[in-house]
Amino acid sequence: MTEPLIFTTKGNIPLASLTREVEWRIAEKVIVFIERYFLEGEMVKESSHVKLLDGVAMSADVGKIGE
């Protein structure tokens, strides 16, 4: 089986060569998950995932057809 790689600013690097760091930011209306990968102390990849806790307000136009 081949060794898993991660695409970084330095190209594809074996996962075993990297240090992973995660951070959670939790606020009233949002949760942010941040994932960082480091190679010898240098950050080579960062990604984040955001979850909004309040939905988007929606409304529908209501009217009569044919008037």
Image (spheres, rainbow, N blue to C red):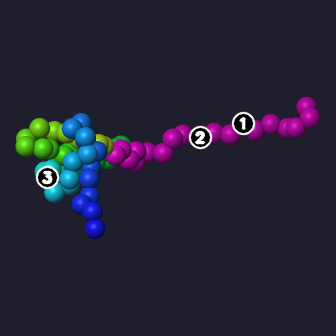
**Does residue 63 show up magenta in the picture?**
yes
Measured in 3D between alpha carbons, the distance from the residue under mark 1 to the one under mark 2, in whole angstroms, is 10 Å
Residue 3 to residue 65: above or below:
below
Query: Tag 2: Cα neighbours inside 10 Å, few (<14), some, or many (≥20)?
Result: few
Overall secondary structure of the magenta section: loop
Q: Which residues are magenta?
A: 49-67
Amino acid type shown at disc 2: Met
Q: Do the residues bearing badges 1 and 2 touch, measured as CB atoms within 8 Å? A: no
Q: Residue at x 51, y 41 (%)?
A: 56
Q: Residue at x 7, y 43 (%)?
A: 40
Give the quadrant of the N terminus. Answer: bottom left
**Does residue 61 show up magenta in the picture?**
yes
Q: Which residue is mark 1?
A: 61
The kind of secondary structure element at disc 1 is: loop
Amino acid type shown at disc 3: Ser
Extreme residue toward the bottom, this view: 1
Q: Which residue is mark 3?
A: 17
> Which mark sits nearer the N-terminus, 1 or 3?
3
Query: Tag 1: Cα neighbours inside 10 Å, few (<14), some, or many (≥20)?
Result: few
